[in-house]
Image (cartoon, rainbow, N blue to C red):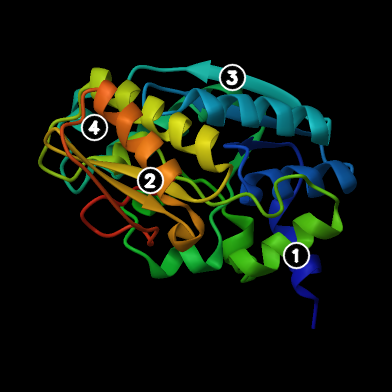
Amino acid sequence: MPSKFEELRKIVGDRVAIAFSGGVDSATLAALCRKWGIEAIAVTVKTDLMAARDLENAKRVAEEIGIEHVIVEVAVPDAVLENTPQRCYYCKKTIIKAIKDVAESRGFRVIDGTNADDLKDFRPGLKALEEEGVISPWAMAGFTKKEIRRVAKSLGLSVHNRPSNSCLATRIPFGERIEVEWLRRIEGAEEAVIDIIGERRIRVRKYGKNAAVEIEGIEEINDKKLEAIESILKKLGFESITFSESKTESKTFFCNR
């Protein structure tokens, strides 16, 4: 019986365009393609839903891996901005079509970093991947997020322990229309939190004009830092700020990245 890695290598094939966010899943897949000598490119789609920090991270990680990095900018369709529970489906369709345009111009197939754990969650974007014929090697070979992090660490990738992230649309509950102005405020708020407490899993959720700040390991953060965060967020236009422990995305917000 072939090992999981042998199965993974077989699924990946040759001449591939990787849907590349710069997170541990897509980065490790890209690094393995380089290691195996596969002709591959990393394609990142930039939209208003993507934080500047995440785009810079994708650029840095692609350079670290040594893979050609193509960045494509696309507009967010109104079907996404309406922010229904199918938001992620429409977003993923837009992103994958942009990646396919690049891939097909080179005669490449499109693969992505969806893992076996992702298949257990509420992820409307998975339907879009299936419809567009995207191959998900990690999921097909049965690799979990924990296993992928171990592979990333063994390859020496700097993102092996980077907190999982999701697009900025996930900070706004379904039913509330997404406004780009508020996305930038949310992005600024999260930047401020990271600047004050350091890199860890954080989310700034928007409820009307109020912010619910979720911080991983919040018990480690002293009151002075929380007060500094509250002050900055109020300057950004949030009227009331609450703090809680970071949690997994709920069906009220979730988006398949």
- Name which quarter of the figure residue 91 lies in: top left
Q: Residue at x 31, y 61 (%)?
A: 122
Foreground label between 2 and 3 = 2
Which three-letter amino acid code belongs to the residue tagged 3? Ile
Looking at the rendered structure, the kind of residue marked 2 is Arg
Residues at discs 1 and 3 in contact (Cβ within 8 Å): no
Three-letter residue code for mark 4: Val
The answer to the question of whether label 2 and label 1 lie on touching residues, with beta carbons closer than 8 A, is no
Q: Which of marks 2 and 1 is nearer the N terminus?
A: 1
Q: In what element is the residue under mark 1?
A: helix
Q: Which residue is disc 4 drawn over?
A: 80
Horizontal side of 45 relative to 5 (left or right) equals left
Dot in front, 2 or 4? 2
Disc 2: CA contacts within 10 A as few (<14), some (14-19) or many (>=20): many
- The percent position of residue 185, horizontal first and vertical second, equals 31, 24
2 or 3: tag closer to the N-terminus: 3
**Disc 1/disc 3 C-alpha distance (Å):** 28 Å
Quadrant in which the N terminus is drawn: bottom right
Q: Could you tell whether 203 is left or right of 242 in the image?
A: right
> What separation in Å lies between label 3 and label 4 (alpha carbons)?
21 Å
Residue denoted by label 3: 71
Does residue 9 appear in this view? Answer: no
Residue highlighted by disc 1: 150
Number of the front mark, 1 or 3: 1
Most foreground residue, 214 or 81 = 214
Rendering coords of residue 12 (x, y %): 71, 52
Look at mark 2 in the image and give the residue it sits on: 203
Question: Which is more N-terminal, label 4 or label 2?
Answer: 4
SS at badge 2: strand
